[in-house]
Image (tube, grey):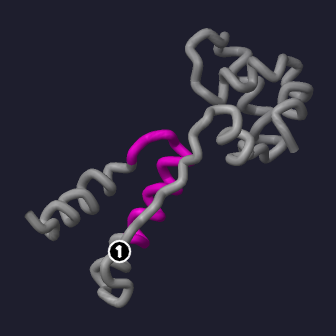
Amino acid sequence: MNLRDVAKKARVGSATVSRVLNDHPDVKSSTRARVLRAIEELKYRPNLHARTLAGGKTRVLGVVMVNLYNPFFTDICVAMERNAVLEAETGETPPSMRRWIVPKLKANARP
């Protein structure tokens, strides 16, 4: 399943499907609805590897930890991973990242 399959089903070009996926404002609402319906019917999911190549962003999260056995660091890594997945899927920083992880890291940072 790829972008062209969605475009074919929605009777639009692949650039239009891309615009819909990237929430571009210059797409008619009727066309947007048709593309979204095709995406849902085909159960299309964007290929993150292809998006990385096209967009030039790897979306890789690197973490350096002092102590793997400290539950505090484990909890932080688990939360970061969950939030990274949410951010990758929605394109927005989840509120829990701003509300919970960042303050915890600041509170435990050494001067």
Q: Residue at x 49, y 53 (%)?
A: 86
Count all numbered tags in the image, as a single digit.
Answer: 1
Secondary structure mostly seen in the magenta stretch: helix
* Residue at numbered disc 1: 65
Q: Residue at x 48, y 57 (%)?
A: 61
Mark 1: secondary structure: loop
Residue 75's place in the image compared with 103, above or below, is below
In screen coordinates, is 34 left or right of 71? right
Which quadrant of the figure contains the C terminus? bottom left
Q: Residues within 10 Å of mark 1 (few under 14, many from 20)?
A: few
Q: Residue at x 35, y 90 (%)?
A: 69
Q: Give the percent coordinates (x, y) of residue 50.
A: 74, 41
Q: Give the percent coordinates (x, y) of residue 37.
A: 76, 32
Which quadrant of the figure contains the N terminus? top right
- Residue 50 or 66: which is nearer the viewer? 66
In screen coordinates, is 15 left or right of 82? right
Q: Residue furthest bottom?
A: 69
Residue 35's place in the image compared with 74, above or below, is above
Instruction: Tell me the magenta residue range.
Output: 77-93
Q: Residue at x 84, y 43 (%)?
A: 42
Residue 67 picture quarter: bottom left
Q: Is residue 22 magenta?
A: no
Q: Is residue 88 magenta?
A: yes
Residue 53's place in the image compared with 19, above or below, is below
Identify residue type, mark 1.
Met
Q: Give the percent coordinates (x, y) of residue 18.
A: 71, 25
- Residue 54 or 81: which is nearer the viewer? 54
Residue 68 picture quarter: bottom left
Q: Give the percent coordinates (x, y) of residue 62.
A: 46, 61
